[in-house]
Image: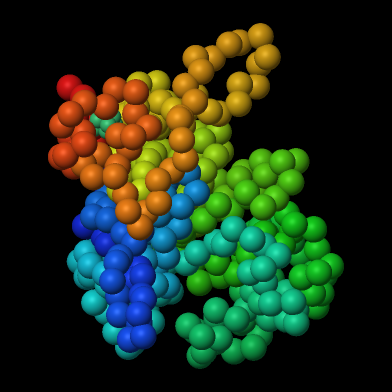
Amino acid sequence: MNSQTLVEVRNLKKYFPVRSGILQRAKHWIKAVDNVTFSIKEGETLGLVGESGCGKSTTGRAILRLLPVTGGEVIFQGKDLLTLKGESLRKARKEFQMIFQDPYASLDPRMTVAQIVGEPLKAHEPELSAADRDARIIETMEAVGLNASHLRRFPFEFSGGQRQRIGIARTLILKPSLIVADEPVSALDVSVQAQVINLLIQMRERFRLTYLFISHDLSVVKHICDRVAVMYLGRIVEIGEKREFFKTPLHPYTHALLASVPEPDPFRKKERNILPGDIPTPLNPPPGCHFHPRCSKAMEVCRKDIPVLRDHGNSHYVACHLP
Ligand code: SF4
């Protein structure tokens, strides 16, 4: 694997205003993404995991500028994507694409498959002739396991797995560098999830792709990712190489997440570590370590001081006051 950094996210912040009063002034802020820092190497797949509402999808959207951000930097090829405008932003957008969670909602039902897959080419490569565009569409469709006979059909004529293949083809047609895959299989039947994951792995090798893979499903993440980052209430609490992460998780929240993954072998018993309580509201998160009300190891310092990511060796970083 090439060890060059493709994208570096530094102190990314996305705060949503909570408005009230006649003037609708922002009285409070929801810190959906709060000082998130990580990098992804070329050809790598970084998994971003955590419970629903932890800020992982907002992070993906903020990186792609699908949302205005509050602060931070996203460095790609020496430039901060968050400051680009006009033509330079349009060019950068070609390099960064997204696969959405819901293949039912993300495809326009009035467009044919050829129109859906070819649409990004019209926007980003308008100089292509119709014949060249059709050739690119067919080539990309075949790469994802569909064929030319599907081109004139509409999304409703396809199964969930095939629709997600159409979504992947639309993403690949611009030959991007980074793909943010936001829960790409969670809306699919279990029987087709593995096929789509294997397709994403094949596409990564064939087109030298880099993924930010957002998921709440740790067994899927274990299969496809090289490194894993865990988010809790807008912050990254642990990040490390996959092998190290699954073998020696260090953050108490990661322990709880791993303990909640169902054990496929009914004869193997697993340590029970069920988290007490629900994830607190991001409108009023607990001070210090956000996880302290649910943490069995919480100390006095945890209620006051925000733990920062500390290096535990082997590229394993953990934000916890435990030694
Ligand atoms: Fe638990 Fe304290 Fe570590 Fe937070 S900092 S995870 S409360 S031990």
Residue 20 image offset from top left, x and y in percent: 36, 76
- For this rendering, which residue is in front, 106 or 251? 251
Q: Is residue 259 left or right of residue 199?
A: left
| Rendered view: 49 above or below 249 | below
Residue 170 image offset from top left, x and y in percent: 60, 69
Quadrant (top left, top right, bottom left, bottom right) of the C terminus: top left
- For this rendering, which residue is in front, 276 or 171? 276
Residue 304 image offset from top left, x and y in percent: 16, 39
Q: Quadrant of residue 249?
A: top left
| Rendered view: 313 above or below 97 | above
**Residue 89 appearing in the image:** no
Please tell me which residue is depicted at 26% across the width and 60% down the height of the picture: 12
Quadrant (top left, top right, bottom left, bottom right) of the N terminus: top left
- For this rendering, which residue is in front, 265 or 223? 265
Q: Is residue 134 left or right of residue 269?
A: right
Count of number-bearing discs: 0
Q: Quadrant of ligand 1?
A: top left
- For this rendering, which residue is in front, 314 or 261? 261
Q: Quadrant of residue 236?
A: top left
Q: Is residue 53 left or right of residue 100?
A: left
Q: Quadrant of residue 314?
A: top left
| Rendered view: 18 above or below 99 | below
Residue 37 image offset from top left, x and y in percent: 25, 52
**Residue 107 appearing in the image:** yes
Q: Is residue 162 left or right of residue 282?
A: right
Please tell me which residue is depicted at 37% across the width and 32% down the height of the picture: 294
Please tell me which residue is depicted at 30% across the width and 65% down the height of the picture: 29
